[in-house]
Image (tube, grey):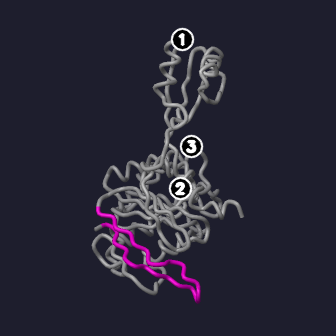
């Protein structure tokens, strides 16, 4: 068992933050932990990493108790940038991990290149932007090639290019056999990374699969956009013009094959079709409607 959390309860004074949390993960996958601020996501991760005590329940990671320090040869935790030291360089942080984990320092340059931080490896962290700090935190969390990786808001502060690179790295790690539990408010990225989400509300977890409620948004690039607009309007097909060459629509409103058939029958050439699965935000809105309206 990669993750085995049973009946986890955590209480601060009279406030019960975690109310009997259960998580069981048997095979390598990417899972998302989603919820509003204060829902208990970081508390749960800190308990799993033995950074916080808890009142009831049990935690096992990689088949061992979470208090067994030997798990950290296979388990890693990407926290927020408050754990970084401004007077040290990025290289210093990574070298420290290599020393503790008895890793060859050749891994430092390799992981720096993988996350795209080679240019500032020898710079002090105090000069780093938020995005640069996220790169370093990622490098620190994967340099040991963990089998289980917990990540608390890893995409925070990243520009679009860095966010795409981060996503690709996480997908690569999972393909290599790493299980990833990622806490994030970026629901678009969640849609791209995983279909398994743990929604956290009032200290409890609701496990759902995006496959049960996700839909597809299609963007079609066509050679006659004005004609396409006229034809689709005449047939009552709802769509949006995203630019001068493209139309977009949601599959639940207009099935893709109907739109394609309509365009084909009017000799309108479809140059490309892009598909984006969406669903995490829709489900989030359903579950947290009261928080959104307050």
- Helix, strand or loop at mark 1: loop
Q: Which mark is residue 266?
A: 1
Q: Secondary structure at mark 2?
A: helix
* Region of the chain picked out in magenta, as a range: 2-26
Question: Can you say whether 265 is above or below 9 in the image?
Answer: above
Task: Of the two numbered discs 2 and 1 on the same chain, state the one appearing first in sequence.
Answer: 2
**Marker disc for residue 161:** 3
Horizontal arrangement in the rendering, residue 209 relative to residue 263 (left or right): left
Distance, label 3 to label 1, CA atoms, is 38 Å
Q: Quadrant of the N terminus?
A: bottom left
Quadrant containing the C terminus in the rendered view:
bottom right
**Residue 28 x %, y %:** 32, 57
- Name which residue lies at 41% across and 52% down: 110
Q: Position of residue 159 (x, y in %)?
A: 61, 47
Farthest right residue?
Answer: 294
Q: Residue at x 50, y 63 (%)?
A: 199
Among the 4 quarters of the image, the one containing residue 35? bottom right
Q: Is residue 13 magenta?
A: yes
Instruction: Identify the residue position indicated by label 2 in the image.
Output: 135
Is residue 264 positioned above or below 141 on the image? Answer: above
Dot 3: few (<14), some (14–19), or many (≥20) neighbours within 10 Å? few
Looking at the picture, tell me which residue is in the foreground, 157 or 28: 28
Q: Is 179 situated left or right of 274 in this image?
A: left
Q: Is residue 248 visible?
A: yes
Q: CA distance from mark 2 to mark 1?
A: 50 Å
Q: Quadrant of residue 27?
A: bottom left
Is residue 102 visible to us here?
no
Q: Position of residue 144 (x, y in %)?
A: 37, 63
């Amino acid at each position: 068992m990669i993750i085995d959390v049973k009946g986890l309860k955590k209480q601060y004074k009279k406030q019960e933050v975690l109310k009997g949390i259960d998580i069981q993960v048997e095979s390598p996958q990417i899972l998302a932990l989603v919820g509003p601020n204060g829902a208990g996501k970081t508390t749960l991760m800190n308990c799993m990493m033995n950074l916080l005590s808890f009142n009831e329940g049990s935690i096992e990671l990689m088949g061992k108790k979470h208090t067994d320090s030997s798990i950290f040869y296979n388990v890693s935790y990407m926290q927020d940038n408050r754990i970084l030291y401004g007077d040290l360089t990025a290289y210093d942080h990574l070298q420290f991990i290599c020393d503790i984990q008895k890793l060859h320092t050749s891994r430092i340059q390799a992981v720096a290149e993988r996350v795209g931080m080679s240019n500032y490896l020898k710079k002090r962290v105090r000069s780093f932007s938020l995005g640069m700090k996220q790169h370093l935190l990622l490098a620190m969390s994967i340099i040991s090639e963990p089998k289980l990786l917990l990540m608390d808001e890893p995409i925070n502060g990243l520009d679009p290019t860095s966010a795409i690179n981060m996503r690709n790295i996480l997908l690569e790690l999972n393909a290599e056999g790493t299980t990833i539990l990622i806490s994030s408010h970026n629901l678009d990225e969640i849609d791209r990374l995983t279909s398994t989400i743990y929604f956290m509300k009032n200290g409890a977890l609701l496990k759902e699969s995006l496959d049960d409620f996700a839909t597809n948004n299609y963007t079609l690039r066509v050679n006659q956009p004005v004609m396409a607009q006229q034809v689709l309007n005449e047939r009552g097909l709802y769509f949006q013009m995203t630019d001068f060459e493209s139309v977009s629509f949601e599959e639940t409103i207009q099935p893709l094959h109907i739109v394609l058939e309509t365009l084909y029958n009017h000799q309108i050439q479809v140059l490309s079709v892009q598909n984006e699965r969406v669903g995490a935000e829709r489900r989030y809105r359903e579950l947290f409607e009261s928080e959104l309206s307050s």
